[in-house]
Structures are given as structure tokens and as C-alpha cells.
Image: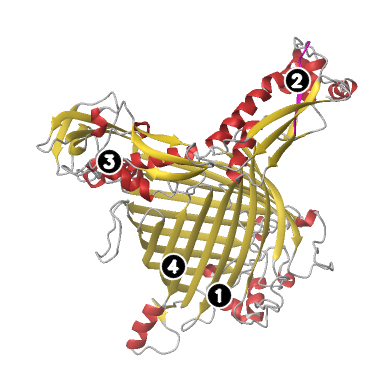
């Protein structure tokens, strides 16, 4: 390999040696000049012009302007033997880069593209040109300068509509008049005018005019009558078929459900008000499941939106491998002259059993490393009604790499084991006063779980729980989750003398670790506007524990600490809100997160249970720091951390993250990120000095880290590796100043995970 590098350096003086007569190597765009005459070209038009000239040169760094100083691919192309065998032949094929020639870039064609863009956006008197800039050292190299002369754009003037007085044309005129793109004074834009035609078509196809297309509408333009103005008249095209002008009604819906497209024994035919169902046996599906997903109504105007919603509801059941839909004209007419359309739907059942495997790993600056694994098994159609029964077994194991020799594994290793069983029903088994939308699949969910947690040198804790949850949609963007019943039981099954000593010295901490029942009610609201270039997702959760039981016990005359099955139950309120903002910038995404949470114990509890408190750090939080290793506030319990591992939690949490995600090659993506956050105590604790939240120390209490990451993003699966680099720790590290990480090595946190952090 060293010889290969030396050979590259020795021939690096020329990147044009093999170019033929008249061939010129393209070295990028030198400049894009806008010569604006008393006007400023709109930003969206500038973006389109940039796309027209955006041709990457060889060894591009930031296309099309900048290049790396090492054109390895060109060196290989010009000076290596393309017919070489063995290692050199393999390296040639991997490293070679064909030269990008000016003749291939075709700047004259790109100028024509710019001129077309200018005309399509109303800049009728504007124009573009280009110039080749030959290198003074090598005339076989040239960059390109593009000049765009910009004059005032033309705006829309008088607008005329069809005004033909038929039901069809009345709809067209009504939609056009309300469209924001089709208004006097707007800059002329061909894309906007096409958008008007598309919107009109969408409205018509949802009012029965199924065969109408955007090209059946045209514009007559007059740019001569008034300077700088385009008068438009909306007209019907001359070649519109009669079928496109006819309104159609929904007739019959035929649904076929099958296990395999090529295998069936006999067919059961079932008639419903909404559809005719054909079950190609053997299939295991409830008779009323499919009709509940059909949105079309017999005798009503045919709506494309109803077809889309029907397909969406069927797919959300999660039991079909394919769903095919076909619309057929019956060639029949009603007494009013309307046509009739039948819909044929073929649903092929997927395999009901599904297995999943998830793995993750971590490496921490406190010398703990280890893997995590989750194995899941689910049945997607348990009772034939798309009920989902699933079980997940998860575990994680961490060991300390620099532990003292002879130490027992159980003393220095941390692990967690968990099992959860879930049963989800695609119906809302809730009182009728719960407002829901029939346009979406709603769920009733039941779950049971058990977890075992081992913390080295301190304790082992088990947690058992169960809950029932309703999940329903109010509209496309809003999802509600209400848990009317959730019960957890936390119990310490073993503890060490070091843990007992820590609890004796801190009664508040001891209270959070006591054996306790947690009877909880919880509500979560999610707003998901993940459509378009700027996406916002907002999730807020509020939960309350113990008040109903406490009220019942008080009515019954109970005094002091109230108990459930002989064990105290916890009483607290907890709230958390998170906003994730995703902005697309070219091929990159800038993703930001803001998270805020608070919890407060009252009544039957003096402290929030350990499992309900907040923590910070880890693969999905402040990635430069290990999970649960920061806070509360400036507090650092070094005196009770002989192995550098002690869970640190709080009752108030603030976190913010910013991550720039960009493509590298194919499925491989990169990321640069900045994380900040901490947890605090809402009540002062003398045993954890500096743990309470104060405005004076708030900014300095924030742990700050940056880092880089790579992701292998295959859409359905994302494998992620992040390297966090600590910038500021909120506690005393022994180093003065804001940048107080003891050393670069101690500031690193490496994480392997599945999925994006937020």
C-alpha cells in the first residue's frame, strides 16, 4: 500500500495526460453572478437555478464550487494501466474516476435550462449566459462562470374563469377563486399554475369526477395588453373525453382475502352492507374486520379519498403482505345520468408469526462496556381480528474493564433482564363519550412486564407491572393515549453494606428506593406534523399516582402511611414534554430536540420513586456521558462510587439536542451533534449539596457534549454508532474553567444503537 501511495505522489503533477484533442477538464463553477436590475430574484427561483448548474467536478468537496486537493481518481485514470492484474488492477477499479469534461457538462444546455426557468417563473425579459475560465497553467482545465441578468418579473393581472353554469364548471371556478396561487398580483409561475390545476382535479375526483385529469384544463395567457402583467383565462382543453365530464357514484365493493395468490381450495362469500367479502379458504379472519375498513358508501359520489383511506385502514391492521385495488366502470347509468364504479380489492395475508432481534452496545469513560439484546416474538392475527400478541425478552450486560484482579463478577458487573407481554386489539373498548375518528384504526392495549436490575456493589431490584391503555386518533396529526389503569410494584431483593450506608446517610434517597406499589393514571398527547420539509413532533405526558387509592383509604378512615396489600403505595404527579423539529436543508437534515420534565411527591410519599425519576446521558441523550451519570445539578457522589457506577436521578429534567444529518455514500449517513442537559431536585436535599435547581447556576449546571456519528440507514432499519466528546461537566472535575473535562480520553463516550436518538 505504501508503494501505491508513493506511485500516486510521483505522478500527481498531471490530471489531464490522457485527455484527447479538444477535450477540457471541468474544474467546477467559479461563480454564479446575479445582475439584478432594480429587483431581487426570489429565493425559490435561485434554488432552481442552482440545481440547473449543480454538476460535481472530479474530487468534489462541496459541489459544484470546491474540490479536495487530492484528485486520486484522476491520477489513477491518467497514469495507471487499466489492464493491470492482481492487486493493482483491483485498486485501479476501486480508485479510478472518469474525468468530468466540459463537453459533458454542456454549459450551453444549462444556460438554456436557466432561461427556461426564468420564463416559467415570470422573468420574461431576463436572460443567462456563461463563460469558460481556462487555467493559466493548463489550457485543458477550465471552470465556468454563469451570469444571470434579472429584470422585473411579470405578475398576474385580470383572471377569467369558465363561467359555463354546469355543476362541473361551478366546482372548477369555485376552487380556482379560492386558490392562493391564482390571485391578481402574484408573480407569474408555471409551477403554481400547474398546482392550481392539480388541486382542482383532486377536488373533482373526490366529488365523483373520477376520470378528470389536470391536463384537461388550460390557460390562455395575454402578456401584451399591459406591460409587466399577464392576464389569464382558465379554459377546458379541446380533447376532453366525455367520461371525464361525467359524475360517477360508488356502486359495489368486492374484497377477496387469501393466504396465497396461487393457492385456494374453496371460497366463502359473505354479503355486507359495505362490501361483498370472498374468503378463499383456508383463511383465519373475522367476518366483520374487513367491512369496518371500507370507506366507500353505495350510491354516493365516488371519492378517491375513500379509496386511499380504505387502503390505509387495511394496511394499518398489519396482517396483509399486499393490498391491490382496482376501479372498474360498470358501463351503467343511473336515472340521473351518473355512471357507476365498482371497486375490487385483493388482500393477501402475511405470515402471522414474526420474530425480531435488536442489539446495541456501549462503551463508557467509566470503563463499563457491554452489549444489549432484545428478542421478540409476535402473532399479528391472534384471534383472526388483527389482534397482536407479542412477547419481548430483553437483557443488557456491562462489565468494568479496569476492575481489580480477583474481584467477583457479580460485584463489578451490571445487568438488566426484562420480559413484557402485550396484547393489542384494533378497536377502542372505551366509553362512547371518548371522541374518536372513524377514519383511523384505534387500539386497546394490555400489557404485563417484569424486570430485574442489578447495580454492582449496591443492589438488585425487581419490578412487576401491568396496564391497560386506549390509543385513538382525533385527526391525522393528533394521537391520544390514555392509561386508566397502570400498576407497578418495585422491590429491593438484595442490597450491600455500601448501599445501606449510602441510604442511612441520605434518608431522601432511601425513600425513593423503598418497596412500593405505584398505582398510576397516565395521558399522552402526540402531535405529528411529519409532512413536508419542516417537520414538528410534540409529545406530552402527564401521570398521577396514588390519589384515587388515597382518597378511598381516607374515606374509610385510614391514618398515617396508607398501604396496598401490606405495602405502601406511592403518590406523586409527573409531567414531561418533548418537541422534535426536523428541517430539511438540501440533502441534509437539521434535527433539534427540546425536552422538559418534572415530578413531585405528595400525600402518601415524601419522595418520587426511583423508577419514576428522571436521568440523563447515554446513547439517546447527552452522548458524551454515561447513562445516569450526571446530576442532580452539580452534585457528584464520588464518595460512594468505588467502581464509578452509581445511578444519579432527579425530579426535574432539561435537555436540548441538535444534530446535523448528512449523506455520505448510499445507505451510509453521517452526523454532527451537540447535546446539553441535566437533572435537578425540586426540593433541597442537604445530603446532595448542589442538587437543587437554581436560576443562578442553571447554565453552568448543564452538561455539554458534542460528537460525530455514522448511521447505516436502510429506512426500515437504522444501525447507529456515535462518539460523544465531553466539553463541560456540571460537577467539580478538579480542573478550573468552563472546559473542565479532566482529559480527552475521559471525555469520550462510544455508543452502538438501533434507530435514531430522536
Q: Along the polypeptide, which appears first: circle 1 or circle 2?
A: 2
Label 4 neighbour load within 10 Å: few <14, some 14-19, many 20+: many
Residue shown at 43% from the left, 74% from the top: 545
Residue shown at 11% from the left, 36% from the top: 334
Q: Which residue is mark 3?
A: 169
270 sits to left or right of 87: left
Q: Along the polypeptide, which appears first: circle 3 or circle 4?
A: 3
**Residue 466 is drawn in which quadrant?**
bottom left
Determine contact: label 2, label 3, CB under 8 Å.
no
Label 1 neighbour load within 10 Å: few <14, some 14-19, many 20+: many
Q: Which residue is mark 2?
A: 91
Residue shown at 16% from the left, 42% from the top: 298
Q: Position of residue 456 (x, y in %)?
A: 65, 62
Q: Along the polypeptide, which appears first: circle 3 or circle 1?
A: 3
Q: In 3D space, how far apart are the residues under numbered discs 1 and 2 (Cα atoms)?
A: 62 Å
Q: Position of residue 536 (x, y in %)?
A: 51, 55
Question: Any mark on residue 488, and which?
Answer: 4
Q: Along the polypeptide, which appears first: circle 2 or circle 4?
A: 2
As for residue 347 lying within the magenta part, the answer is: no
SS assignment at label 4: strand
745 sits to left or right of 267: right
Q: Is residue 37 visible in the rendered structure shown here?
A: yes
Q: Along the polypeptide, which appears first: circle 4 or circle 1?
A: 4
Q: Which residues are magenta?
A: 21-30
Question: Any mark on residue 512, and which?
Answer: 1
Q: Position of residue 48 (x, y in %)?
A: 59, 37
As for residue 24 lying within the magenta part, the answer is: yes
Q: In 3D space, how far apart are the residues under numbered discs 3 and 1 (Cα atoms)?
A: 70 Å
Amino acid at each position: 500500500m505504501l508503494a501505491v501511495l508513493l506511485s500516486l505522489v510521483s505522478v500527481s503533477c498531471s490530471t489531464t495526460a490522457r485527455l484527447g484533442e479538444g477535450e477540457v477538464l471541468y474544474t467546477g463553477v467559479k461563480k454564479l453572478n446575479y445582475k439584478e436590475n432594480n429587483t431581487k430574484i426570489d429565493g425559490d427561483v435561485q434554488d432552481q437555478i442552482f440545481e440547473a448548474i449543480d454538476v460535481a467536478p472530479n474530487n468534489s468537496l462541496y459541489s459544484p464550487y470546491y474540490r479536495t486537493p487530492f484528485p486520486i481518481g484522476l491520477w489513477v485514470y491518467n497514469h495507471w494501466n487499466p489492464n493491470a492484474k492482481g492487486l493493482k488492477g483491483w485498486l485501479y477499479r476501486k480508485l479510478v474516476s472518469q474525468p468530468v469534461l466540459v463537453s459533458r457538462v454542456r454549459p450551453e444546455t444549462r444556460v438554456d435550462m436557466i432561461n427556461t426557468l426564468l420564463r416559467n417563473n415570470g422573468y420574461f425579459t431576463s436572460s443567462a449566459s456563461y463563460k469558460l475560465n481556462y487555467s493559466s497553467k493548463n489550457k485543458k482545465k477550465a471552470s465556468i462562470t454563469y451570469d444571470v441578468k434579472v429584470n422585473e418579473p411579470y405578475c398576474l393581472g385580470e383572471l377569467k374563469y369558465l363561467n359555463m353554469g354546469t355543476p362541473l364548471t361551478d366546482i372548477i371556478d369555485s376552487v380556482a377563486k379560492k386558490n392562493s396561487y391564482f390571485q391578481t398580483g402574484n408573480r407569474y409561475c408555471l409551477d403554481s399554475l400547474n398546482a392550481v390545476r392539480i388541486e382542482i382535479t383532486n377536488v373533482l375526483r373526490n366529488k365523483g369526477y373520477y376520470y378528470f385529469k389536470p391536463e384537461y384544463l388550460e390557460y390562455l395567457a395575454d402578456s401584451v395588453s399591459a406591460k409587466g402583467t399577464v392576464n389569464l383565462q382558465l379554459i377546458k382543453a379541446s380533447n376532453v373525453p366525455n367520461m371525464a365530464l361525467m359524475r360517477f357514484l360508488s356502486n359495489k365493493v368486492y374484497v377477496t382475502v387469501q393466504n396465497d395468490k396461487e393457492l385456494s381450495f374453496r371460497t366463502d362469500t359473505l354479503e355486507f352492507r359495505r362490501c361483498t367479502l370472498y374468503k378463499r379458504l383456508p383463511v383465519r379472519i373475522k367476518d366483520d374486520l374487513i367491512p369496518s375498513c371500507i370507506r366507500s358508501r353505495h350510491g354516493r359520489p365516488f371519492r378517491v379519498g375513500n379509496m386511499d383511506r380504505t387502503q390505509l385502514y387495511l394496511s394499518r391492521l398489519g396482517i396483509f403482505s399486499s393490498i391491490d385495488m382496482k376501479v372498474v366502470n360498470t358501463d351503467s347509468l343511473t336515472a340521473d345520468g351518473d355512471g357507476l364504479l365498482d371497486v375490487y380489492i385483493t388482500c393477501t395475508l402475511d405470515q402471522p408469526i414474526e420474530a425480531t432481534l435488536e442489539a446495541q452496545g456501549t462503551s463508557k469513560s467509566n470503563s463499563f462496556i457491554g452489549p444489549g439484546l432484545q428478542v421478540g416474538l409476535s402473532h399479528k392475527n391472534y384471534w383472526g381480528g388483527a389482534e397482536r400478541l407479542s412477547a419481548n425478552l430483553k437483557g443488557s450486560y456491562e462489565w468494568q474493564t479496569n476492575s481489580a484482579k480477583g474481584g467477583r463478577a457479580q460485584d463489578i458487573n451490571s445487568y438488566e433482564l426484562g420480559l413484557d407481554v402485550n396484547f393489542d386489539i384494533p378497536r377502542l373498548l372505551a366509553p362512547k363519550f371518548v371522541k374518536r375518528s372513524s377514519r383511523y384504526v384505534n387500539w386497546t392495549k394490555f400489557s404485563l412486564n417484569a424486570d430485574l436490575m442489578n447495580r454492582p456493589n449496591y443492589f438488585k431490584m425487581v419490578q412487576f407491572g401491568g396496564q391497560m391503555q386506549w390509543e385513538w386518533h382525533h385527526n391525522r396529526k393528533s394521537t391520544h393515549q390514555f392509561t386508566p389503569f397502570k400498576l407497578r410494584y418495585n422491590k429491593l431483593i438484595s442490597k450491600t453494606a455500601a448501599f445501606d450506608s449510602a441510604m442511612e446517610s441520605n434518608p431522601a434517597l432511601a425513600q425513593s428506593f423503598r418497596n412500593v406499589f405505584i398505582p398510576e393514571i397516565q395521558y399522552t398527547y402526540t402531535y405529528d406534523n411529519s409532512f413536508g420539509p419542516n417537520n414538528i413532533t410534540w409529545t406530552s405526558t402527564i401521570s398521577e399516582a396514588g390519589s384515587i387509592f388515597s382518597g378511598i383509604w381516607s374515606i374509610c378512615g385510614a391514618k398515617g402511611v396508607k398501604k396496598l396489600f401490606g405495602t405502601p403505595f406511592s403518590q406523586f404527579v409527573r409531567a414531561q414534554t418533548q418537541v422534535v423539529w426536523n428541517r430539511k436543508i438540501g440533502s441534509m437534515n437539521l434535527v433539534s430536540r427540546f425536552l422538559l420534565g418534572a415530578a413531585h411527591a405528595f400525600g402518601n410519599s415524601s419522595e418520587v420513586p426511583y423508577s419514576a425519576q428522571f436521568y440523563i446521558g447515554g446513547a439517546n441523550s447527552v452522548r458524551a456521558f454515561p447513562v445516569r451519570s450526571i446530576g442532580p445539578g452539580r452534585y457528584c457522589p464520588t464518595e460512594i462510587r468505588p467502581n464509578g457506577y452509581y445511578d444519579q436521578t432527579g425530579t426535574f429534567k432539561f435537555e436540548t439536542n441538535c444534530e446535523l444529518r448528512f449523506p455520505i455514500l448510499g445507505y451510509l449517513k453521517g452526523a454532527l451533534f451537540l447535546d446539553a442537559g441535566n437533572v435537578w431536585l425540586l426540593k433541597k436535599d442537604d445530603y446532595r449539596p448542589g442538587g437543587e435547581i437554581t436560576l443562578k447556576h442553571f447554565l453552568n449546571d448543564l452538561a455539554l457534549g458534542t460528537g460525530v456519528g455514522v448511521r447505516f440507514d436502510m429506512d426500515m432499519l437504522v444501525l447507529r454508532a456515535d462518539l460523544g466528546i465531553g466539553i463541560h461537566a456540571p460537577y467539580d472535575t478538579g480542573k478550573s474553567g468552563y472546559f473542565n473535562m479532566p482529559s480527552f480520553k475521559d471525555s469520550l463516550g462510544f455508543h452502538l444503537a438501533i434507530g435514531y436518538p430522536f
